[in-house]
Image (cartoon, helix red, strand yellow):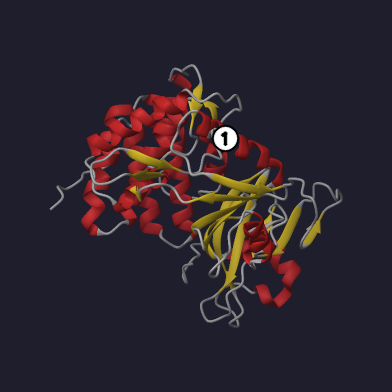
Amino acid sequence: MHAHARSHPLHSDPDFMLLREALGDVAAETGGDGTALRLVSREPLGEGSVSGFAPTADSPEQIWYVDTSRLPVRAETGLATGDDPARPEARIWAHPADPHLPALAATAFGHAAKALLARLGLVATGELTMVGYRPGRRAVLRAATDGGDVWLKVVRPRRLDRIVGAHLACTEAGLPVPTLRGWAPDGLLVLDSAVGTPAADTRWSPRSLLDSVDALRAQISGVVWDRPAPSIAGRLDWYAGHAGDAVGVQRLVAGIRTLLANATVREDTVVHGDLHFGQLFLAGEGAGISGMIDVDTLGRGDAAEDSAAFIAHAVASARLTGVDHRARIGRLADAALERWGDPRVRGFTGIHLLGQANSARVHGDTTGAQTLCATAQRIVDGGSAGDQTEET
């Protein structure tokens, strides 16, 4: 969390106003009486979005979410508004009572997790650690057991069959995905750790890593799987609408639309759906890919989806990583753009970076948002990811 995670007044934010109406004075805008809230996240979800609000730094940490997705859930866990109980205009809940992820609360407190691990012959030997959470979508926790670390993934129950099927299809195709130990119908999966060392923690040259990624993508394309992959193109309007009056966004969006309108749509193939070096594990320095995680989005789609996700993640990571690795990751982004950067890839990359710029803006990082938008514009205009200095 960021103590300064707000870049615009909340009094005009419709999600904040819904929360304030529900919570009263507890939700006073930042700068109030010490119980004020700040915006910490906002992502598209369903027909709307889900926005997270947390107290300012001098208050106990608690996160409330305002959800306007209108997606159906098994049971409400907070306040729902509107005339249609099945598709409320808004939901408000406090973490971890996510109505889209009914297994989350019990898993976060260890009850469901320990029971499932015991059924799998594993004994939990420590506390669960929350590794990642995307409200309304999924959560990932790490559990230490007598058989080593395992990973608990909490997903929407209606997506469970697809995710289990994707893992099994990848295993059948010989892809290096972690072993799926078991799952529960309320949306909880247990997976072993990936084999190898995270690519982010291993030395590699951009060319050798991209060669390995190309080989992996060829193997992914051979998976027997007929579900459609989600496309980043569907998020462009949402990202553009939530960029506010940020400088240059209209020109960037227009450039992306022009690229995609004129680019050739290739025959679909099986893609990872969210491929980037954070999802990859290597057998050792300079070695090939020994592990790949997060195949939840596996599906048939345009190969440009994986190319763009990889490039955009490298661009964003180069900004955030330590100076020792920044130049190398920046060169990886440029090398991937040179290798894969046709007009459709550049357009999709621009959408990813616009979304990352919005996230930076929500967290008060105006400079970072401007940098990401400028980089996106340069890529959309046919240029490089950035001027990278040589690694020392």
Residue matched to label 1? 168
- Side of 210 where 187 appears, left or right: right
Residue beneath the point at 33% across and 35% down: 379
Using the image, determine if residue 27 lies above or below residue 170. below
Residue 317 position, x and y percent, is 35, 50
Q: Which one is in front, 177 or 58? A: 177
The single residue placed furthest to the front in the displayed view is 121
Q: Which one is in front, 74 or 309? A: 74
Type of residue at label 1?
Leu
Q: Which one is in front, 264 or 274? A: 274
Q: How many marks?
A: 1
**Mark 1: secondary structure:** helix
Q: Which one is in front, 369 or 152? A: 152
Residue beneath the point at 61% across and 39% down: 164
- Side of 80 where 260 appears, left or right: left
Residue beneath the point at 51% across and 20% down: 268
Residue 202 position, x and y percent, is 28, 50
Using the image, determine if residue 27 lies above or below residue 366. below
Residue 251 visible in the current orientation: no
Residue 301 position, x and y percent, is 52, 26
Quadrant in the rendering for residue 373 = top left
Quadrant in the rendering for residue 254 = top left
- Side of 222 where 80 appears, left or right: right
Residue beneath the point at 46% across and 18% down: 266
Residue 74 position, x and y percent, is 79, 50
Residue 158 visible in the current orientation: yes
